Amino acid sequence: MKPSRGLLNKIHDIGITIQPEINDSDPVFEQSEDLYGSDLDDSDDQYVNDNFRDGDRSTDAVLCCAMCFTPVSYQCKVKGNSFVSKSAVNLFVDDSSDDSEKLASSEDIMVTPDSYKRRLIKKSTNERRTAKCVECNNIVAHIDESNNYIFKDVIASKP
């Protein structure tokens, strides 16, 4: 019976870097001086400023969906533990609620005084407004009564 050599055969010494062997038939590639276009960052920033930002074009972060990394906001402000923005991209607004909830809320509205009715209607219409990612249907924001997106569960990166 032969002694076991283990799962890995020791064919190279530890600490020695192995280089590929070069054959005469291999094409010769010269190293490029600049593999990355340094001017691309400036042109990308200018494109985002022109197409996705309004007003003073300042932002605290660029927000992406936490599930699929799709950009959802290019201009936002930090407010407490969430991000607030007037505009968003790659989102759709979901106003869905089941019929039993609609019936219960409409009955409550019918038996209340007029000024209180308006507040209930406003509350019930804005209560379930959520914004979902177009790519993965993840809820990334809620929409408040002044149509601001309040982002939570997003990935924030430096602008």
Image (cartoon, rainbow, N blue to C red):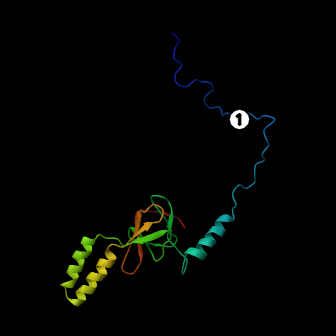
**Position of residue 147 in the picture relative to residue 90 (left or right):** left
Q: Position of residue 18 (x, y in %)?
A: 67, 33
Which residue in the structure is indicated by mark 1?
20
The residue closer to the viewer here, 131 or 98, is 98
Q: Position of residue 7 (x, y in %)?
A: 52, 24
The residue closer to the viewer here, 23 or 111, is 111
Residue at 23% of width from left, 90% of height from top? 114
**Position of residue 56 in the picture relative to residue 113 (left or right):** right
Residue at 24% of width from left, 85% of height from top? 117
For residue 63, above or below residue 6? below
Q: Position of residue 85 (x, y in %)?
A: 45, 74
Instruction: Spot the residue most to the top.
Output: 1
Instruction: Spot the residue most to the left.
Output: 111
Q: Is there any visible trace of residue 123 in the rendered image?
A: yes
Q: Secondary structure at mark 1?
A: loop
Residue at 52% of width from left, 13% of height from top? 3
**Position of residue 7 in the picture relative to residue 117 (left or right):** right
Residue at 78% of width from left, 38% of height from top? 26
The residue closer to the viewer here, 9 or 81, is 9
Instruction: Spot the residue most to the front.
Output: 99
